[in-house]
Image: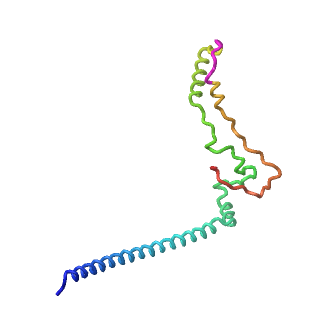
């Protein structure tokens, strides 16, 4: 006769078989997903290679020259002059370095100019009133850096590249 222990072992073996089957099924699903993702990655890489080859064909200098000749009258293209090219270090400054204008100073200046033109003279300065806002504005003002001039010693063929945001 079957004992209780035998029934427990049969139940444990059945549960173990069910868990093993579930794990195997999930692993097979994951393998299929990995294969699908690998196929998508290969397709994307092939598409990128195809687009790079197409770009190389589209940007060939001979082809571009022919297009310029064909559409010259419509586009009115002109060659770029060497003076139109600048190096990154010749650019004025980064956006983060631009001084913030004082908006209240501009409003006060505009208002005082309107009052002065209406009265015909600046009464506040004639009385000797101190101009504290103007002094504060000049203290906050920062000098605007100018681009460095190109030196004769620089190699014209050498192109300097770099990130605009440092």
Return the x and y of residue 123 as percentages of the image width and height.
62, 13
State which quadrant residue 71 falls in: bottom right
The scheme the figure's colours follow is rainbow
The residue located at (33%, 76%) in the rendering is 22
Q: Nearer the viewer, residue 122 or 58?
A: 122
Which quadrant does the N terminus fall into? bottom left
Residue 1 in the figure: left or right of residue 76: left
> Can residue 149 be found in the magenta stretch?
no
Residue 2 in the figure: left or right of residue 21: left
> Can residue 128 be found in the magenta stretch?
yes
Residue lying at the far left of the rendered structure: 1
Residue lying at the far bottom of the rendered structure: 1
Count how many numbered circles sit on residues in the image. Answer: 0
The residue located at (36%, 78%) in the rendering is 24
Q: Nearer the viewer, residue 109 or 70?
A: 109
Return the x and y of residue 5 as percentages of the image width and height.
22, 81
The residue located at (52%, 70%) in the rendering is 44
Q: Main secondary structure of the magenta part?
A: loop
Residue lying at the far right of the rendered structure: 153
The residue located at (69%, 35%) in the rendering is 143
Residue stretch rendered in magenta on the structure: 126-133
Residue 29 in the figure: left or right of residue 160: left
State which quadrant residue 12 falls in: bottom left
Return the x and y of residue 65 as percentages of the image width and height.
69, 63
The vertical placement of 31 against 130, above or below, is below
The vertical placement of 87 against 19, above or below, is above
Q: Nearer the viewer, residue 96 or 118?
A: 96
Return the x and y of residue 73 as percentages of the image width and height.
66, 56
State which quadrant residue 13 falls in: bottom left
């Amino acid at each position: 006769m079957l004992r209780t222990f035998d029934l427990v072992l049969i139940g444990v073996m059945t549960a173990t078989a069910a868990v093993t089957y579930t794990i195997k099924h999930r692993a097979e699903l994951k393998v299929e997903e990995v294969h699908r993702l690998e196929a998508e990655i290969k397709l994307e890489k092939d598409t990128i290679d195809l687009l790079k080859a197409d770009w190389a064909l589209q940007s060939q200098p001979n082809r571009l020259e022919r297009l310029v000749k064909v559409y010259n009258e419509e586009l009115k293209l002109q060659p770029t002059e060497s003076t139109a090219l600048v190096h990154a270090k010749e650019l004025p400054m980064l956006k983060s370095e631009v001084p913030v204008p004082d908006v209240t100073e501009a409003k006060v200046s505009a208002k005082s100019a309107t009052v002065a033109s209406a009265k015909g003279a600046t009464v506040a300065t004639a009385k000797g009133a101190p101009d504290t806002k103007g002094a504060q504005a000049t203290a906050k003002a920062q000098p605007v850096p100018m681009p460095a001039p190109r030196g004769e010693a620089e190699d014209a063929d050498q192109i300097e590249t770099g990130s605009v945001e440092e």
